[in-house]
Image: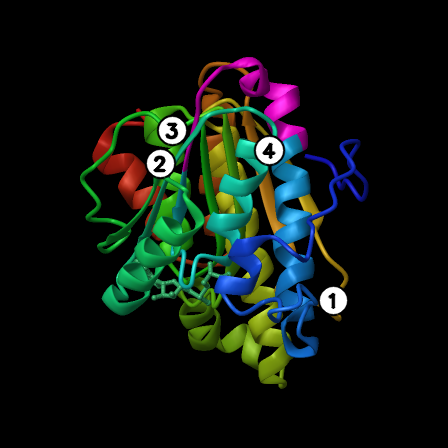
Amino acid sequence: MTNVKKNTNKYKLDAKEQFLIETGISDNNGIIKPRMHKKYKQISRFTEILSDKLSQSGAANQKRVKAIDIGAGKGYMTFAIYNYLVKNNLDPVIHAVDFNSDLMKQGNETAKKCGFDNLSFINDFADQYSGLTYYDAVVSLHACDTATDDALFMGLKMKSKIILSAPCCQKEVLLSLKQKKSLSKFVKHGLFLHKMADIMTDNARVMLLQSQGYHVDVIDFVASEHTQKNTLIAATKKRGKQPAFYDTYKSYKAEMGFEGIKLEQMMLDEGLLS
Ligand SMILES: C[S@@+](CC[C@H](N)C(=O)[O-])C[C@H]1O[C@@H](n2cnc3c(N)ncnc32)[C@H](O)[C@@H]1O
């Protein structure tokens, strides 16, 4: 696992792109609205990192690239990725999943206006989405709490080449930490407890990804002024299963005193950890 600050593919998202105007990131003159600058920065950087991973994994040499965005919301990032792939002659098929039906309807209308024919917004819960075929890349940007686990699991189950996920609102480990008397003696500030839980959750996710033969980079993908939730887990499939990482994960859970996370349970149910 490494910390990577820079990537090699320089990518500039043109503020005049129709999808940016349609989704309200840019105004009608193609100028980024001041309040949308942070989101613009996030989706530009995320797309830039994805472009690097597509090159490194060989997916950029395919004619068709399939990706799924979990917890897509208004689809800012979904559109950015689709747009990038079209501009790079990669013939994309992209599915976006979110349980917010209004946003999915709106997303499909915008996709139609932009002529993004192979982009579909699907109203579903991330862990119930049954349209699974193979996706080269599974992405999620701030999919709340365990929706991030759902995204990671989808990628692991399909053995996707690339899994990119910027987590947020991690709550599972936080509950265990709050109940730990030995910890509450020393850690009095809720903010510290939240930060500890975020790191512990994401560290657990990294080990589980590694157990399936993924190489994982953990990156601050944008400066914290663009979002406080700026950690990106970037995983690429490199080899077969590596059970030693699951052994380490189990020791880690025991040592740190938490029950486990949804990703582990889904992997157990699917037989990925045996
Ligand atoms: C913070 S928003 C992020 C939206 C978008 N990815 C972005 O960065 O602009 C989180 C989105 O995840 C969706 N979501 C949360 N939990 C979900 C779940 N279990 N299944 C499907 N969607 C979920 C919410 O409806 C919301 O649109």
As displayed, is residue 89 above or below residue 106? above
Q: Residues within 10 Å of mark 3 (few under 14, many from 20)?
A: many
Q: Nearer the viewer, mark 1 or mark 2?
A: 2
Residue carrying label 4? 87
Q: Nearer the viewer, mark 3 or mark 1?
A: 3
Identify the secondary structure beneath mark 4.
helix
Q: Earlier in the sequence, mark 2 or mark 4?
A: 4
Q: Are marks 3 and 2 in contact (CB under 8 Å)?
A: no
Residue carrying label 2? 118
Q: Earlier in the sequence, mark 3 or mark 1?
A: 3
Q: Earlier in the sequence, mark 3 or mark 4?
A: 4
The disc at residue 135 is 3
Q: Amino acid at mark 1?
A: Ser
Q: Amino acid at mark 3?
A: Tyr
Q: Earlier in the sequence, mark 3 or mark 2?
A: 2
Q: Are marks 2 and 4 in contact (CB under 8 Å)?
A: no
Label 3, label 4: how far apart the Cα atoms are: 20 Å
Q: Is residue 30 left or right of residue 5?
A: left
Asked whether residue 185 is in view, the answer is no
Expressed as whole percent of the image width and height from the top left, the position of residue 203 reads 57, 48
Residue toward you, 34 or 268: 34
Residue shown at 66%/44% (left/top)? 218
Residue carrying label 1? 224
Q: Which residues are magenta?
A: 52-67
